[in-house]
Amino acid sequence: MAKDFDVEFLEYVVKALVDNPKDVSVERKVDEMGVLLSLKVNPADMGQIIGREGSTAKAIRNLVRIVGLKNHARVNLKIEEPEGGRAPRPEKKEMSDIDNISL
């Protein structure tokens, strides 16, 4: 029970943030480097988990590390990308690409 507290904590935090809590899954792997938690969420919820400039993901990682320290383990978080990868970013337009400017 105590060894899976990190999984329970991560699921609790992530399910509170996303719109599709039933799609949240966490896989736990232990090796000589420590504990690796792999998080999978609904593709529509990825933006909520990552946050602006990764701030939410960074905060979640910090919380998981703290839980690990309290249990004398090194815990890392890997956020799995949804199938199909990331959506392509829209290209930025340069001043030379703008044809008509209305003032």
Image: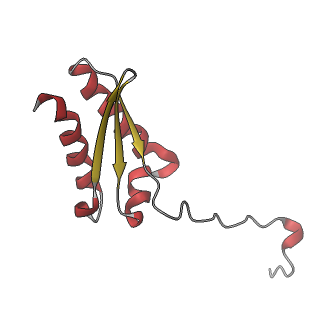
Residue sitting farthest toward the left: 1
**Left or right for 66, reference 88:** left
Location of residue 28 in the rendering, given as x and y in whole percent from the top left corner: 29, 38
Q: Is residue 99 above or below residue 67?
A: below
Q: Residue at image x 37%, y 36%?
A: 61
Q: Residue at image x 55%, y 60%?
A: 86
**Left or right for 1, reference 18:** left
State which quarter of the image contains the C terminus: bottom right
Q: Is residue 81 above or below residue 32?
A: below
- Report the number of discs: 0
Q: Residue at image x 24%, y 54%?
A: 15
Q: Is residue 91 above or below residue 100?
A: above
Residue sitting farthest toward the right: 96
Location of residue 74 in the rendering, given as x and y in whole percent from the top left corner: 33, 22
Q: Is residue 67 above or below residue 84?
A: above
Q: Residue at image x 89%, y 68%?
A: 96
